């Protein structure tokens, strides 16, 4: 890496970043936000819409304040795939703030925000998986005890809203941009429950003055690695501590539910729709579902990254069958084509510059698999559809669920139910029927899965097959490829 820090003038952007009025607040200024939502804000600024500068807040590290100051708030997004690359400068992230372990960030500082978004990952909602109930085991318990010094996003936003209620009283839209079904409803549910306990006078005002639209966001923006930093520096000729490398594809679908102001996102390509659910289900089940499937089966095939899995012949053939099965559970969103979406998904995951560690994708499987694999499996069982690929994913997951062993790069997978999952694997080791039964009885999965003898038996069979061939990638690949040939032969 060089010691140079890039300097970009406002003429490169077509607008003066310092002249942008602060309008938006974002919680969770990670790589995804910098490579996704900020690009849309930048699109607006380039169109002459200058009143939506963004203030970013991290309730926990990393602390980006120093590097943000050194770069004048400017950074680059390098988009690359097998078809080409482009690099653009972003100037809309005007301020960043962080709450560290030894400091408290007063949410009232941001009381004048006119639009709020979040990317905090599902764990950041501090809820019991599958519900909007607050999880007493999470950090939310401390926030309930000291609501004026919040350490979680729900607590932070409730404190901000209470300050707003006491001052301007203006309505506000808070849009979750996390990869969670009905994310707006989840955010609303946990915040209302928190407010009822910690800020009871806030609750009725919140219900009348705050909108929580659902949204669906899509762009693969991996965490920066040494390799991606080198790619970015090579493209720029200088170091960029805030820059990110992403795929070219991007999509943002936002429910048309608003209280107060909202940026004119339609001018930047955001799809404003009455119902996000069809788009959400399409992405969660096809793109994210295939990512999770590749994570579980790819590691058994000797693959370490998403790219390796997405270019493995056996997995690609299997993936086509999986996507057809997933599409059969979907209502096609307006303007979309599920077959084309499937082809685009396969092409996106085969991007050689996007190499997500499979162990990272597999992390938090107890959060991801219920929506991505279990729910569509239950629907396919009910309709007589093709659920075999789903049984295979379950079997692959059961072999490693809760295992904290690092992958070849040193990445250590995590899961909120890691202890429970590891205990089930250990207790029923070598007993496929008992393993399948124990995992399917977990309350995070539809009861219909465990009650279906054919589905349970299929998992048992694949558990034995994978266990016998584990450690021999070619043998696993052969078994997986055979299931794709079943469809071709049929």
Image: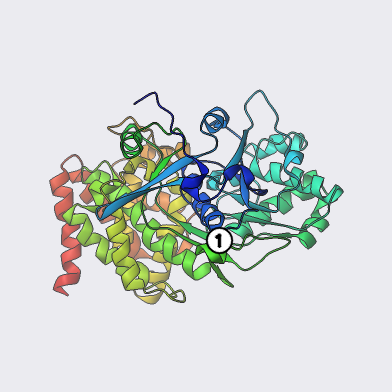
In the rendered image of this protein, does residue 447 appear above or below residue 360? below
Q: Position of residue 105 (x, y in %)?
A: 70, 33
- Please give the count of numbered marks on the rendered protein: 1
Residue 486 vs residue 157, the one in the foreground: 157
In the rendered image of this protein, does residue 271 appear above or below residue 192? below
Q: Position of residue 422 (x, y in %)?
A: 41, 38
Left or right: 476 with respect to 121? left
Residue 189 vs residue 158, the one in the foreground: 158
In the rendered image of this protein, does residue 2 appear above or below residue 397? above
Q: Which colour scheme appears in the figure? A: rainbow
Quarter of the image where one finds residue 478: bottom left
Q: Position of residue 70 (x, y in %)?
A: 53, 29
Left or right: 463 with respect to 368? left
Q: Secondary structure at mark 1?
A: strand
Identify residue for label 1. 215
Residue 81 visible to an observer of this rendering: yes
Image quarter hosting the C terminus: bottom left
Q: Residue at x 31, y 64 (%)?
A: 344
Q: Residue at x 76, y 34 (%)?
A: 146
Q: Position of residue 177 (x, y in %)?
A: 55, 54
- Dot 1 crowding, Cα within 10 Å, few <14, some 14–19, many 20+: many
Image quarter hosting the N terminus: top left
């Amino acid at each position: 890496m060089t010691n140079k820090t890039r300097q970009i003038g406002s003429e490169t952007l077509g607008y003066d970043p310092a002249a942008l009025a602060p309008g938006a607040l974002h919680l969770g200024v990670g790589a995804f936000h910098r490579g996704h939502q900020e690009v849309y804000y930048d699109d607006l600024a380039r169109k002459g819409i200058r009143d939506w500068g963004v203030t970013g807040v991290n309730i926990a590290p990393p602390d980006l304040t120093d590097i943000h100051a050194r770069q004048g708030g400017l950074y680059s997004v390098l988009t690359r795939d097998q078809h080409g690359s482009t690099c653009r400068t972003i100037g809309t992230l005007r301020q960043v703030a962080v709450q560290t372990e030894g400091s408290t960030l007063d949410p009232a500082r941001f009381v004048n925000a006119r639009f709020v978004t979040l990317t905090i990952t599902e764990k950041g909602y501090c809820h019991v998986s599958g519900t909007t109930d607050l999880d007493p085991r999470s950090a939310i318990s401390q926030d309930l005890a000291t609501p004026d010094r919040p350490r979680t996003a729900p607590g932070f936003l409730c404190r901000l809203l209470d300050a707003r209620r006491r001052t301007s009283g203006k309505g506000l839209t808070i849009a979750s941009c996390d990869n969670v079904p009905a994310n707006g409803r989840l955010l609303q549910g946990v915040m209302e429950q928190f407010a009822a306990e910690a800020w009871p006078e806030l609750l009725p005002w919140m219900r009348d003055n705050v909108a929580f639209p659902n949204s669906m966001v899509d762009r693969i923006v991996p965490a920066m690695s040494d390799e991606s930093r080198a790619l970015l520096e090579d493209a720029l000729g200088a170091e960029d501590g805030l820059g990110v490398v992403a795929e070219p594809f991007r999509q943002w679908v936002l429910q048309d539910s608003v209280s107060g102001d909202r940026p004119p996102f339609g001018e930047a390509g955001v799809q404003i729709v009455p119902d996000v659910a069809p788009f959400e289900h399409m992405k969660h089940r096809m793109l994210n579902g295939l990512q999770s499937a590749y994570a579980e089966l790819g590691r058994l095939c000797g693959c370490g990254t998403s790219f390796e899995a997405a270019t493995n012949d056996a997995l690609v053939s299997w993936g086509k069958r999986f996507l057809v099965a997933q599409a059969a559970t979907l209502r096609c969103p307006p303007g979309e084509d599920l077959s084309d979406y499937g082809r685009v998904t396969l092409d996106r995951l085969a991007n050689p510059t996007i190499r997500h560690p499979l162990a990272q994708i597999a992390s938090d499987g107890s959060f991801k698999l219920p929506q991505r694999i279990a729910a569509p499996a239950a629907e396919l069982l009910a309709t007589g559809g093709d659920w075999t690929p789903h049984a295979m994913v379950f079997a692959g997951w059961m072999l490693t669920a809760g295992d904290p062993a690092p992958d070849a790069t040193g990445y250590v997978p995590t899961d909120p139910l890691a202890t429970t999952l590891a205990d089930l694997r250990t207790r029923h080791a070598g007993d496929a029927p008992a393993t399948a039964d124990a995992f399917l009885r977990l309350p995070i999965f539809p009861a219909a899965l465990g009650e279906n003898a054919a589905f349970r038996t299929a998992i048992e069979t694949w558990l034995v097959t994978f266990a016998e061939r584990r450690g021999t990638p070619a043998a696993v690949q052969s078994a997986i490829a055979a299931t794709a040939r079943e469809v071709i032969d049929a």
